[in-house]
Each structure stands twice: as C-alpha cells, then as structure tokens.
Image (spheres, grey):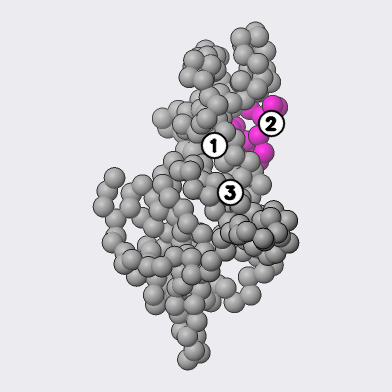
Amino acid sequence: MSKGRKYPEIIVGARDITLRQKPGNKPVEERMSIVSNRVTMGFRDGTAHRLESELEASAMEMFNANPNAVAIRTQFGPLPFRREGKDFNHFADLCVDFRNGCRNLYAVRATANLGDLEVELDLIRKGSLKRYAHGLYLLTENEITKPAVIRAGQMVSSQTQQNSAKTAKVLKALARVCRPVVIFDLYHMLEGKLAFSELWTAIWALFDKGVIRHDHPDPANAVMTRLSTISIVKEDDNV
C-alpha cells in the first residue's frame, strides 16, 4: 500500500444518529423516528452504517464491490466553508479510503434535490477540503444507475459464494468456443455440470476478476440477464 496524504485527527459524525436501547424505553425497532427509518448497511470489513436514503445505500453497494475501497464512513465532517460573508458547515454523506492511500468524500443527492449543493461543494474544494481529503465529488442517479448497483450486488455475492472449481469450468467452456456466448446457451453447453445458480455465481466472480465482459453496446447501463452475451476479455480489449 502506497503512502497517501496525511490528515489531521478530526471528530467524525458530530451528528450522533446511533440508536441506543435503554431500560424502560420503547424497543429501537418500534421507535418511529427519522433515525430509525434510515437504511442500515454493512461494509465488507464488518462495520455497519446508517444511511439517509436509498440512493446512499446504492452508492455504498457500489463501493462495497470495489476491492480498492478499504474503509467507509458516513456523515463525515463538519467541513467548514464560507459563503456571502457567513460561516457554514457541510457533512459529506460518504467518506471512502482507498488502498492507495487516497481519501475521497462524496455528496449523494438526487438531481431534483440539488439546490445550491454544487456551489457549496465548490466552496469547500477551494477552502477547507485539503485538510480532510484528496477529493470531494457529487454522486446522483446519473452515476448510481440501476445496472451499476445490480452489478455491484452480484459481484459482492459472488465473492462469498463462488467455488473456484466451478468458476474454472465456466472459464474453460468460454475459452473452448472462442466467441461471445449467450449465458443461457453456455448453461446448455455445460450439459448439466452446473446448476444455473452456480453458473450465474461463477459468471459474476469472473466479472469481478475482470476476466470476462458483457458484450453490449452500452454495458454500463444494461442489466445483464440469462439472455445476455458474454466473452473472455482479450489483452487489446478496451473495457
């Protein structure tokens, strides 16, 4: 791991959104509050995080599938900025630390609800950001697309469920035909050696390793199904 920029120790999560169980209180799951209604998701390092929206949860899913993302935090801040002579604070929705030592902050918001957010982010970049992270980015539904989220979820699932021997069988079958293959046809080519669920898991494991590709004019925005075409990635492929 390369050494990245050093950051000062800061208090993260000045907003305490932890739900605590106290004697005599109504059970946590029965408390109808803005906090209890938030989405809770786990990261692969075993940590659990409260998220303010389904869009944030989808972003978390995508980072969870990225092997270079090693740690994640929510409600990171406060990040100070000054606007029109007044001082303000902003909390980044997600803080992601990467394997190479880079730290990026992300504001996650639907385009319909952006308001002046882009202006605020630009003021933070020009002011206090260098004390906290390398970059500050805005993620909307344009980046957090349904196909990207589904793809991320399948890759994470394959990481825990894959069987190396079964994955090798799938790769061998693809290599043998030397051409793009419809997934359902590949299932029949294997002649019952794998259940379709096992084939599906193996395919996503190969995607996760960057060994195969989805042959589609716009794969980043296409949901892969059993009728999709896949092929082995070649050295000169631009994927």
Residue 63 placed where, x, y %? 51, 48
Residue 21 placed where, x, y %? 61, 57
Q: Which residue is mark 3?
A: 41
Q: Is residue 88 left or right of residue 52?
A: left
Q: Mark 3: which secondary structure?
A: strand
Q: Residue at x 66, y 47 (%)?
A: 146
Q: Which residue is mark 1?
A: 156
Image marks 1 and 2: residues in contact by CB distance under 8 Å: no
Q: Which residue is mark 2?
A: 225
Compared with 186, 133 (above or below) is below
Q: Is residue 193 magenta?
A: no
Q: Specify start and end residues of the magenta stretch as a single range.
A: 214-229
Disc ID at residue 38: none
By secondary structure, the bulk of the magenta-drawn segment is best described as loop
Of badges 3 and 1, nearer the viewer stands 3
State whether residue 140 appears in this view: no
Q: Mark 2: which secondary structure?
A: loop
